[in-house]
Amino acid sequence: MMKWIVGVWMLILLAGCGGEEAVEEQDDFPHSLVHEGFSYTPFTYPADWDVTAVSSNVRLAFRNEDNPEENQFAQVPFRYTFTFGERAPENEVSEDELDAFNEENRRNEETFRQNYYHTSFEQYARLDISKNGFLRLLTEYEGVEEKEIAGREVLVLRSENQWAANWFAGRNYYDLLIYNEAMIASDEAFEGILEMLMP
């Protein structure tokens, strides 16, 4: 009888451990989509946000004008873009469609690649991490504030419940846009999100 009880407890413990590992593997998303050669510090984001898209940009390394099929692109992207929002229950875009889209871009010498996409109801935010400068340089706009958040200098621009931020960390340029749909209405809420996203 004692052996049976011990056996049951062992099964429960093993099942519990297996569940934790599965969660850890899932928690690696979306960072598992980032090339290992792209150095950055993984971030977290609000629990009620979904990652709805991940894209990247790669440099054209070799152009064959006679045969575009032989064009070669850098293996490591120079920019990643993460889009957050509310996912729809069903994704209307298949993996095959993504592959076809990326292949068409490659043939047309386009540098944009869609690494992941899920149909969404709303967009909450967009985070760009780039090796070669800011996409939206906030110093060019009026009303920009310079703040220290989590020990980093951050440029912040606000228009009602829409926010933009620039910061530099670990040789990467970070551009953040938060849209009205995210309903971030206070400095404290915005800074809390920044602290999650900052390395």
Image (spheres, rainbow, N blue to C red):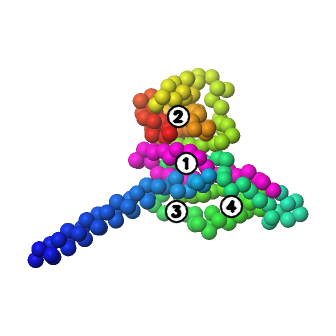
Residue 184 in the image: above or below residue 72: above
The amino acid on which the numbered mark 1 sits, given as a three-letter code, is Thr
Residue carrying label 4: 102
Q: Residue 72, percent across and down?
A: 77, 59
The amino acid on which the numbered mark 3 sits, given as a three-letter code, is Asn
The stretch of residues the image draws in magenta is 38-62
- Quadrant of the image occupied by residue 126: top right
Residue at 39%, 62% in the rendered image: 22
Q: Residue 198, percent across and down?
A: 50, 38
Please tell me which residue lies in front, 182 or 129.
129
Residue carrying label 2: 162
Give the CA separation, mark 3 to mark 1. Answer: 15 Å
Give the CA separation, mark 2 to mark 3. Answer: 27 Å
Residue at 53%, 33% in the rendered image: 163
Residue 123 in the image: above or below residue 134: below
For the residues labelled 2 and 4, say whether their Cβ atoms are less than 8 Å apart.
no
Give the CA separation, mark 2 to mark 1. Answer: 15 Å
For residue 42: magenta? Answer: yes
